[in-house]
Image: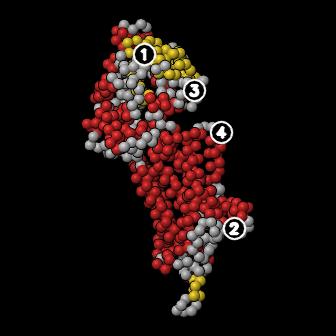
Amino acid sequence: MAKSIDVSDVNIYYGDFKAVEGVNMTIRARAVTAFIGPSGCGKSTFLRTLNRMHEVIPGARVEGKIAVSGQDLYDSAVDPVEVRRMVGMVFQRPNPFPTMSIYDNVLAGNRLNSRKLKRPDADDIVERSLRGANLWNEVKDRLNKPGMGLSGGQQQRLCIARAIAVEPQILLMDEPCSALDPISTAAIEDLIHDLKDRYTIVIVTHNMQQAARVSDDTGFFNLKAAGQPGHLVEFNPTKKMFTNPDNESTEAYISGRFG
Amino acid sequence: MSTADLFETTTGSLRRRRAMTDRLVTGVIWAAFAATLVPLVWLLWVVVSKGLPSIDGNLLTHDMVQRLDPTTGKLQAGGGLEHALYGTLLVTLGAVAISVPIGLFTSIYLVEYGGRSRVARTITFLVDVMTGIPSIVAGLFGLALFTLIFGVGTRMGIMGSIALSLLMIPTVVRSAEEMMRLVPNDLREASYALGVPKWRTIVKVVIPTALGGIVTGVMLAISRVIGETAPLLVAVGAAEAVNRNLFDGRMMTLPVFIMTQYGTATPEGYDRAWAGALLLIAIVMVLNLTARLISLIFAPKTGR
C-alpha cells in the first residue's frame, strides 16, 4: 500500500541555522516526485526529514507538519524508528554492509531487527527483492559472496533491494545515480519506473534530464542568496515544469541559464 | 616552445650532488633500520639459545614445591614452572575479563553518544592520564583496595588482575575508539534508514565492522601487561605451588618466577629463568599471531 505525503509549512534547522523554510506540497502515492535545484538549496535536507533521518545529526530539528495518510510523522507519540521502517531510503553513495554477504545485505532490515525468518521465507524475500531491484540474474549464483565485491551500479541496486526487502510504503532516493556510469544509471531509472506501481518514490537529482525522464511531479528548490534558507520555488507536474513553468527562475534553471 | 624554455637545464655538478644526497640519505635510513634490528635479533638469539635447552616435559609439568625424592631420600624442588604458567594465564585472563567490557563500553560511549560533550572530553582526558600510571602504582592500588576490604595480608590472583586491568583499560579504550571512528557514517545511516534502533546498529553494524581492529587492540594490550612484574609482585606475591583459584591465596606468575629464579644465583635457577623468559616471549608471539589471524578473518571482505 503506497501512501501520499502532505507537507505543510515545514522549516528545517541545523542548530540555529535555518536551512529550509516554508515548504508546502503534496506528494502523490504511486508516483515519482523529483526534487531539483542548485547545490546547498536544501533538497537533500528536506528529503531526509521525510523519514526523520534529519534528526540523526546533533542539533538538527524540524518545524511544521509532515503527514503520511493523515498521520503526522513528527507527532511526539510517533517513534522515528517506526517511521524509518515505513519510509525506506537509498543514499547517494552505495553503502552495502561490508561484513555481510549479498544475501545477508538484502535481509539486513529484517535480521538487524532480529525478526526470525524461516529459511524458505528468507530465500523468498531475497529473491523477490533482488528481482525487484533488477539484480537477481547477475548475482543469483554468488549470493554468499560479499556485497562489497559488486560494481558500483550493482551495489546501488543491492541497496535498493535492501530498502524494498522491508516492504516500505515510501522510497526516498538521494541522488541515487550520481556516483554511477550511464549504463548503471539507465538500469536504475528503469527500476524506478517499475517500482512506482507499488511505492511512492521521492528522488533528489542534480540531473534535470533524469528528473524529466523518471518523474511525474517535480519540485524546484532554490536559495534567495548565499546564507539564506532554501525554499520551494515551484511544485508542478513534470511535463508542465519542463515546458511551461510558472516561475521565471525555474525556467532559467531548467534551460541552463544558471545553476 | 623548446624544452629549454620549460625546464632549466641541470648542470652535471648539480646532478651529481643530487645523486650523492640520495645515496647518503638512503644509507642513513638503512643504518637506522639495522640499528633497530640488531638488539631485537640479539635478544631473541640469547633468550632462545639459553632458554630452549632447559625447556622439557619436567619443566612444564612441575612446580617448585619441595618433595621427598624416593631414590635419593632427599628433599628436592619440583624444578618446573607449571605454577607460573597457570598463574600468568589466569591473572591475565582475569585482567581481560575486567578491562574488555569496561574499555569497550567506554569507547562506545565516546564514539556513539558522547560527541563533544563535557563528560566525553573529561573521560578522554582521564584515559590519557591513566595511560601514564606507573605499573607499580597500579599494583599498590590493587593491594590497597583489597587490604581495605579484606584486611591486611590478603593475597589473591584477582588483585593482580585488577592491577593489570588498570594498565590495560586505556589501551583498549583508545584502540577500540579509533577503530569505531573509522566505521563510515554511511553504514550507520544505512542501518537507521532500515528502521534499526541505535543500539542495534551499534551491536550489529558498528562493532562487527570494527571487530578486527578491536581484537588486535585487545591483544596488543595483553602483550603489554603480560610481562609486568612489579604490580604482580606487590599484589599477588609469589608461590611455590600450582594455584588455580584466582580468589584464594598467592599465585606465581612468569615474570615473578623469572625474577625469583634469577635471584637464587644457582645454575639451575639461571636455566629456569631463561626458560621462563623464552616461554613469556613465546606466549606474546602466539597472542600477536592470533590477533593477526583474527583481524584477517573479521576484516571486511571485498570479494575481489
Q: Which mark is residue B252?
A: none
Image coloring type = secondary structure
Q: What percent of the width, then of the height, locates residue A128?
A: 31, 34
Q: What percent of the width, then of the height, locates residue A245?
A: 39, 8
For disc 4, the marked residue is: B118
For disc 2, the marked residue is: B154
Mark 1 neighbour class, 10 Å CA radius: few under 14, some 14 to 19, many 20 or more: many
Mark 4–mark 2 distance (CA, rounded to whole Å): 39 Å
Q: Indicate the amino acid at tag 3.
A: Ser
- Asked which secondary structure carries label 3, the reply is loop
For disc 3, the marked residue is: A76
Q: Which residue is drawn at 58% across and 43% down?
A: B109
For disc 1, the marked residue is: A219
**Which one is in front in this view, the residue at disc 1 or the one at disc 4?**
1
Q: Indicate the amino acid at tag 1.
A: Gly
- Asked which secondary structure carries label 4, the reply is helix
Mark 2–mark 1 distance (CA, rounded to whole Å): 75 Å
**Which one is in front in this view, the residue at disc 4 or the one at disc 2?**
2
Label 4 lies in what chain? B
Mark 3 neighbour class, 10 Å CA radius: few under 14, some 14 to 19, many 20 or more: few
Q: Can residue A97 be seen in this view?
A: no
Residue B186 occupies which quadrant of the picture? Answer: top left
Mark 4–mark 3 distance (CA, rounded to whole Å): 28 Å
